[in-house]
Amino acid sequence: MLPGKQGGIAAYAEEKRQGGVPAAALTGFRGIGFLGIVLGYFHLTSDSSTAADQGKRQDSTGSQKEMSTSSKVEWGDMVIVSGVLVGAATFLFRKTLFGARKPEMTIAQKAALAGGADGSSGADEYNEERDFVLKMRNAGKNVVIFYGSQTGTAEDFATRLAKELQSAAVRPLVLDPELYDFHGMAALNEDELAVLILATTGEGEPTDNMEQWYDAFVSNRESPEESEVPEFREPEDKAGMLDMEQPLADVRFAVFGLGNNTYEQFNSHARIMDSRLQALGAQRIGERGEGDDDVDIEEDFAQWKDKTLPLIRAMFGSATPDEDAGGAPALTWTVTETGGSDAWTAGQLYASAEAFDARHPFQAPVKAAAELTPGADRHVLHVEVDLAGSGMRYEAGDHIGVYAQNSDEEVDLLLAALGLLDRADQAISVAAADPHAAQQALFPHVTTYRAALRHYLEIALPVPRAQIKSLVLPFATSAAARDFLGPLANDKDAHAQKVGAGCLSLARLLNAVHAAERTAGETDLLMLPPAAVFELCPRMQPRFYSISSSARVAPETPSITAVVLQYEAAAGPADAKLGLTRSGVATNFLLGVKRYLQGDRAVSLPDGVLVSENAALPTHDASGAPVVADNKGHVLGSYTIHPPVDRQLALPVYIRKSQFRLPTDPAVPIIMIGPGTGLAPMRGFVQERAHQARANPESAQGTALLFFGARTAVHDYMYEDELARLFDDIRTVAPQSQVITAFSRDQANKIYVQHRLAEHADAVFEALLAGQDKLTGPPRAHIYVCGDAKAMAKDVTRALAALIADKAGVPVDTAAQWLAEMRKASRYQEDVWS
């Protein structure tokens, strides 16, 4: 940091700790200094006019009067000069004499006071714990990396970036913006850097943990460029010097966005924040990076780093590290075995909290779990959880986040590959190696190797190329291991074919290395230290599901509708199947929960821990579904389910609010398109409309059209009977309402929901325009689409544009623009995934 840059908020915090001069005294001393300067100024300016008069009087009154006058002037000069000196010294040494000041009011507060307002709408009261600039400087850091993360990828990228940047000259700190205030950003100096790693969610929305910052920087989401200037605190070393239009003129930043090009608002979070920061005067270092999860977001991140890291290092005068220097890398975490073995009891996972969120999920008892399509070739589950006592509320269209657990097979496979199988239940604590790190503990409390891998880490993901290079290859001591890992670390095509397409998790990657070493005659196999594993594997992230119920009908028991993910891994550009079954972490866990509740459960021991026996039995049947070993439930598929003895089986969950909402007026028509499990939020909407119909049978309601698609009517029509009953209720107040189905495999030619839209163009157009035959007025209906983003959602948009163009007699481009305007007005909403 440059000399003279230690003031500002840090100095204010020090003053608050040690006690500063009272405001009144400080004002008085400064007043004396100012008065001295003013008196000196007036004295000096009056001397020239007084001298001539004195000379004239001297001629007529004689030398004695001159001497008398001269002595008086000399005494006055001494008084005035002394005042000037005191005033100047007071000003020049004001910090030493009086200490640092409290941070200035925000720009907005100053403007409010100037206009006679009380400034109550300004920034929150200063909170030292939420001051990221103070935290940076106290820890001796000069780079702060903020992440906006929903699924954990952005957080993982931020952590990895910090590690690559770390040097004597570059000292990064990774922070969660949700825990810090944006108001202090103007305090950053030219020799400090802010890096933003920002994911985009939903329809161009910021992540939950960036919501507060985004709202401040983008007060006008419809026209971000017209947003107001946020309320920054004015630090002391910039007091009176901040440009009210560009208060971030001293800020340097870099930005990388994470998105998916199948979504219309691709990477809008990063793009808009980049634009707003520059509009406020901040200067970007390098290009804005944009990762595309639909292609290869890891490679996008790597390419951005290759371009940006040299610029950051140059900014701080840091040399480029020698990647061939060898040696084990410095690790982020230290692992301490606490002595002896400590069996992990499930009760320790059921922590309590006053408020429940992503960091503190609520342990929701499972009220029901059933299979919706027992005759189909895929498992589709219906699961209900109980929120009673949590204080959480939801609305139809919201999402529920579920924390799952890894399968026993994946856990044991990794324990064996790490040589930890015989110490799996060893109690451990995992702490940060850096005493100034923002996160000092990886897990909430002491755990075990087995529990950490089962509950807290994502261990089934393919290992990124960068992680192989930085955290696996450096520990390889044999030539066979280095030869095997080298191409995977340095050749993106080789990595994509072997690791990406083959879904090689860390356990499977290590097993492949060990096989190569044994073939080469090596006996000292590659063994990663646990600390490297805890750094390499991201934290377990919640899986989000569209809630498939209405809070009006089931206020405390939201439901989940999910298809169980199972597939065979592919290898190589030809996608040749490897014959290895891969299972989705969360949905297969939910399948295990369903089977547990239906009686296929393990025996509960007195301490509440369940044991898995018969581990040598096959773990999957011919369809890929987990096997229940026997009716006693000693093996429950590939999961060990263990609720505490005195409690019901529960899932760690929390509610995430969504913009996917029914219109508040039930008279507004709704058009719902939800094939497959895209039916989930539509079921909630239909339940709500049926409830409103029953509650107000005399009130007319807008038409409700539901387009549902699946493979076959016999095996895949989920909630069929319930939907029939609900629409009977809705038609009592909205006679034109109906369910329109598309079963793709019930006939030779496959039929999808977009085909049914065209077939029912009259009903759709009537709902949209209520009798108008031209696009002269605003639409009346709301359109909702849920399901696949890559194909279905785009096909639906094209089908809607085509039918509107046909019915209204306008070009398709005009109809498409009309739909785009519906999106802007939040009347065309999507809840889609890829």
Image (tube, helix red, strand yellow):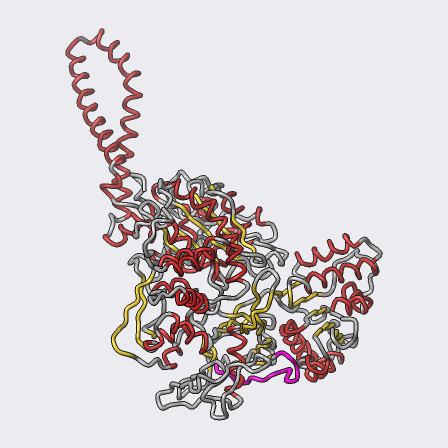
Position of residue 646 relative to residue 89, above or below, is below
Image location of residue 813, percent across then percent down = 76, 52
Residue 473 x %, y %: 39, 58
Residue most toward the bottom?
631
Residue 762: image location, x then y, percent: 82, 67
The residue sitting at 63% across, 56% down in the picture is 264
Picture quarter containing residue 472?
bottom left
Is 794 located above or below residue 675 in the figure? above
Q: Nearer the viewer, residue 56 or 388?
A: 388
Instruction: Give whichever of 724, 570 is nearer the camera.
Output: 570
User: In the image, which residues are magenta?
Assistant: 365-378
Above or below, 69 relative to 463: above
> Camera-side residue: 317 or 757?
317
The image shows a total of numbered marks equal to 0
Q: Find residue 151 and report its horizontal and vertical position in percent.
A: 50, 64
The answer to whether residue 282 is seen in the rendering is no
Q: Is residue 274 visible?
A: yes
25 shown above or below 656:
above
- Specify the quadrant of the image occupied by residue 557: bottom right
Horizontal arrangement in the rendering, residue 386 relative to residue 827 (left or right): left
Specify the farthest residue to the top: 59
